Image (spheres, grey):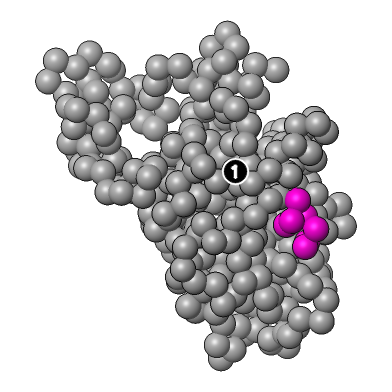
Amino acid sequence: MTQLLKSAFCGNSLLFALLGLMLGAGPLWADWNNLLLGRPSIQDEIVERQGYALGYRESAEQAAWVCYELTADEVRLKVCDRNDNFRPDPRVDTGSATLDDYRGSGYDRGHLAPSADMCWSWASMDESFFMSNMSPQLPGFNRGIWAQLEGCVRDNAVAAGALWVVTGPVLDAGLPTIGSSGVAVPGAYYKVLLDREPTPRMLAFLLPQTASGKLADFVVSVDQVEARTGLDFFSALPDGEEKALEAAVHPEGWSLKGGSSGHGASASGSTAPLCKGLTRKGASCRNPTREANGYCHLHQSQAPGGTQVTPSGGADAERPGQCMAITRKGTRCSRRATQGGYCWQHAK
């Protein structure tokens, strides 16, 4: 019932939450699993949504962290475009920042969970524009290296099948503020990535607002980000595994070129040709593909001599070795199957 409600009302998260409560399903946002691997801080007000969860820091009038899982299928699937529906967050008990706080400040309303990571759902896209998901960023930073880093995350999610992402501002004491709400202006931002399969690995970035140049210059250990922010990332991991991963700095094997929008680019950041296939609506497929026949994994049945049948779920088409589970977001799990046809999470 929960999945049916989400599918039917993904454009209106409040509506399907209320319907779920009336039908006895409980608060549906508790099902969205964005905090499966732990809360970075227990001191912040938690707001969990379809596409991400955040910890709101009232003293700074912004989130101290935003956490979500980004899968390859979510990057590839473009259900909707950016809608720019910036507005205060009604679920922040103390009241979030407002548009007036940023007006005339010289700072961008910089996304923490990027809208380009949320194109797979109308609800997740719309919710990415709540002001609780914004932080004051210099225009050159927000539209420059920060946007490159966001593209880098999407490229790596496609390459890995799925990544866990935690991102946010460094909320030092005594920061300058903007607006009547007193929105703190951070001097730096971080992103922490976790790839669980096949061998767990982490990658972290710490970037000052003045940063420019190569992303590789801002790679640090997760321990360094934790020391700077006071947060504890992925605390649900076994202690020994967490400690080893967070102390290491191993950028090799990751794409650090960035700049991809998530559509039409390969995991290495280079342009890949788009699929020759047609969607069920007759439109050209927008998925990038490296297949020799020019068709992506969803449209192999359309290739000359193709035998694969595309399931009605579209982006949920099965790939060899893919987990058989359906996620709580209603999409096919894109992780590799390791145990009896299921990935490490869904085998439990």
Q: Secondary structure at mark 1?
A: loop
Front position in the image: 94 or 157: 157
* Position of residue 96 measured from the top left corner of the image (x, y, whole percent): 72, 71
The residue to which callout 1 is attached is 250
Q: Residue at x 49, y 35 (%)?
A: 160
Q: Is residue 243 left or right of residue 196?
A: right
| Disc 1 residue type (three-letter) | His
Start-end of magenta stretch: 223-229
Front position in the image: 289 or 119: 289
Q: Residue at x 26, y 34 (%)?
A: 290
Looking at this rendering, what residue extends furthest in the right direction?
A: 43
Q: Residue at x 24, y 29 (%)?
A: 291
347 in the magenta segment: no
Secondary structure that dominates the magenta span: helix
Q: Quadrant of the C terminus?
A: top right
Q: Residue at x 65, y 24 (%)?
A: 345
